[in-house]
Every structure is written in C-alpha cells, then in structure tokens.
Image: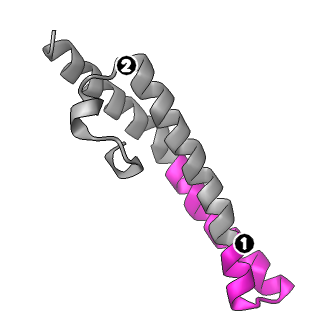
Amino acid sequence: MISAGHSWSDIKKYSLAEAGVFLKAIIRKNRRDYVSNLNQLWYGSNLTQEGLQKAVTELSKRVKEEKDLEPKEIQAEWKRLAGFMSGRR
C-alpha cells in the first residue's frame, strides 16, 4: 500500500475493511498494468504474430505462477494485518 502512495501513519489508522478496499484496488491496477506492459512489449519489439504468441505464453505462465501464490500471500498479509490491528486495541 505504501508503494501505491499511502503513508504508514495513514495505514495504521485504516480499518480492515478500508485496507481491503485499498488492497483490491491495488491488485486491479497491477492487472491493468500487466495488460499495458504486454501491449508495450508488442509495439516496442515489433514481434511477428508467432513471436507475440510466444511472449504471451511465457507471460501467462508467469502470471499463473504468481496467481497460485497470490491467495497464500494475501492470507498471510491479512493475518499479519489482523494481528497488528488487534494489537493496537
């Protein structure tokens, strides 16, 4: 959240619901950036159709690997955040 422009002092004041909204928005932005990066790759490299398909396949594999990790990482972050927030009460 800090990399998205939230200050640590503000983050400490967020409720879990607020943090969840911000985190979901950050995830959506990251996915849009992925599509944008793919378009830039195609335009910048002047790939042939076969070259583009190969790049898309490789990037799709990476995204799938990241998605496989994503739920575990998100759960770990929620647990960490919940522990932090309950410690503040």
Q: CA distance from mark 2 to mark 1?
A: 35 Å
**First to last magenta residue range:** 39-67
Q: Position of residue 18 (x, y in %)?
A: 43, 22
Tag 2, which secondary structure? helix
Q: Going by the image, does 28 lie left or right of 45?
A: left
Which amino acid, by three-letter code, is at mark 2?
Leu
Q: Quadrant of the N terminus?
A: top left
Judging by the rendered image, the residue that carries numbered circle 2 is 16
User: Hey, which quadrant is residue 72 in on the image?
Assistant: top left
Q: Going by the image, does 63 lie left or right of 17?
A: right
Work out whether 24 lies above or below 44: above
- The residue positioned 67% from the left and 76% from the top of the image is 40
Q: Going by the image, does 10 lie left or right of 44?
A: left
User: Hey, which quadrant is residue 45 in on the image?
Assistant: bottom right
Which amino acid, by three-letter code, is at mark 1?
Asn
Q: Are marks 2 and 1 in contact (CB under 8 Å)?
A: no
Q: Position of residue 51 (x, y in %)?
A: 76, 86
Work out whether 15 lies above or below 10: above
Disc nearer the start of the sequence (2/1): 2
Residue found at the very far top of the displayed protein: 89
> Magenta residues: mostly which secondary structure?
helix
- The residue nearer to you, when weighing 9 against 56, is 9
Tell me the number on the disc at residue 39: 1
Tag 1, which secondary structure? helix
Q: Position of residue 50 (x, y in %)?
A: 82, 84
Q: Going by the image, does 25 lie left or right of 87?
A: right
User: Hey, which quadrant is residue 80 in on the image?
Assistant: top left
- The residue positioned 61% from the left and 52% from the top of the image is 31
Residue found at the very far right of the displayed protein: 49
The figure's colour scheme reads: one colour
**Residue 12 highlighted magenta (yes or no):** no
